[in-house]
Image (spheres, helix red, strand yellow):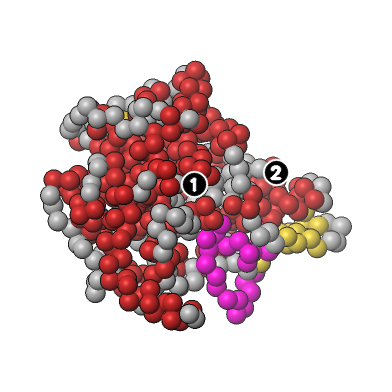
Amino acid sequence: MDTASTRNETSAGARDASRKLARHAATLRYESIPGDLLELTKLCVLDTLGVAIGASGVNDEARLVHEYARDLGGREEATIWGFGGKAPAPWAAFVNGSLGHMLDYDDVSDGGHVSISTIPPGFAIAEKLGMQGTRVNGRDFLTAVVAGTDIHTRLSLAIDIPDWTMAEGWFATQLFGYISGSATAGRLLGLDEDKMENALGIGYNQMSGSRQMAVGAATHMRAMQAGFSGQAAAAGAEMARRGIIGDKEFLEGRYGMFHNYVRTGTPDWDAVIGELGTRFPLLNTHGFKVWPACAYTRPTNAATLILRNTHKLKPEDVESITIVGGTGGTQLLCEPLDKKRRPQVSIDGKYSIPFTTGVMMARGNVTLRDYTDEGLRDTAALAMADKVSYRAIPGAKMERGGSSGSIGMVTVEIKTRDGRLLSSKPDSVPGDPKQRVGWDVIESKFRDCASFAARPIAAAKIDRAIALVRELEQQPDVTEVVRLLTP
């Protein structure tokens, strides 16, 4: 059967795509999940907890959203990470999901940031269930997260528009988070196929996530993407458990997601519903961030580091650095050049390729401290940022960004003072499937992030939490991790 025939046959069967995803989320068995995906998911749990806790002591937004949720009051059902104290489960999911993206250090995949879309509402529901006398064990928690991240990834892979989040103006993290978070929360609540379908439909009815954002503001809503979707997921799954009916065809219906939000008439339905329970595309698209900035800075960081190390370059050897080509996201992070060279607040630095490239060339690494007020004023980094410029490639064909932003399209050229022109165009970055990182890297990152917590966490508790996550599948109560990390 040829490709066109296969696509037509799959499309004809897409009328029940929403139902198939609901069945997948409700019935996925732990035993069917590949071992390497379980290991990856445990790493995602530790990574997500770390970046959220780190944000609690660094970002003004963190303090503001925490104070807002605290002042609302309500039943103390789930923990606010980094700060301590509890809030109703949906509000805990809102704060923790928001914290998870504030450092822009959370993991990435095709579909944005899948872990902050699923793990915060997952823990919030697990804690609430624990208060009601039902402990969530590690196997069930991992299965629920895998179900959510699998659906999230599949929805993104179905889209046939190059660099679609830029072209259509959506944040995939939030847009799909309403569905993936609902799948995770619903699975933990024990929803059957019918109620899971309602939960996904309720999630769809709350869907949002525009890329429009405040520029140059120290505190704005960009970081709260997964906060909104996580809150909605936790609440929507609870509504479905109580019998509220949700949309039944949120994907394939006349006003379904692909038609209304992505505006594509030809989604790849096989990517959505093909081999559910046996094919897990997250394994091929997931990446951990080893540098705390926007994903579109990862390829330029990698290329700059390669040139720095290969040619043993020192900052004083560099005359100019040129970023060549890339997707729309790459250009967006390079222009206007004068502002990108001189970010005034942390988030603008993380969304600046000139500044971040300047840091990498000046120091040979990029860390959380480079985006503090002191780091943004560092004279060596700023002097190097002044040497960074961007050059477009006329007529270049756009490609999918994937987990690495513009991997495969960006070239970094460094002109040295002695007249050499050096260039690098990496096909992967550290943390991606081709350059996987393991427990040593993620554990070190977790400890660094935890050191920024709003309220200090004892070293012994950090050690114990790491050990517990390493063997999460053996734990009778996953919320013990949260208790260990609560100041």
The residue most toward the right is: 418
Sequence order check, earlier mark of 1 and 2: 1
Q: Position of residue 65 (x, y in %)?
A: 31, 39
Q: Is residue 233 left or right of residue 469?
A: left
- Above/below status of 436 relative to 204: above
Q: Find residue 221 and name its label.
A: none
Q: Is residue 330 left or right of residue 266?
A: right
Q: Which residue is mark 1?
A: 34
Q: How many badges with numbers are in the image?
A: 2
Q: Is residue 434 left or right of residue 95?
A: right
Amino acid at circle 2: Gly
Give me the C-alpha separation between circle 1 and circle 2: 36 Å
- In this view of the protein, can residue 231 be seen by the observer? no
From the viewer's side, name the closer residue of 436 and 421: 436
- Above/below status of 430 relative to 449: below
In the picture, the quarter occupied by the C terminus is top left
Q: Which residues are magenta?
A: 387-412
Dot 1: few (<14), some (14–19), or many (≥20) neighbours within 10 Å? some
Q: Residue at x 25, y 42 (%)?
A: 190
Dot 1 and dot 2 residues touching (CB under 8 Å) = no
Element under label 2? loop
Amino acid at circle 1: Pro
Q: Position of residue 284 (x, y in %)?
A: 54, 56
Q: Residue at x 17, y 46 (%)?
A: 241
Q: Position of residue 1 (x, y in %)?
A: 48, 80
Prevailing SS of the magenta stretch: loop
From the viewer's side, name the closer residue of 197 and 80: 197
The answer to if 399 sits in the magenta stretch is: yes
Q: Is residue 189 left or right of residue 464?
A: left
Q: Find residue 364 and name its label.
A: 2
The answer to if 13 sits in the magenta stretch is: no
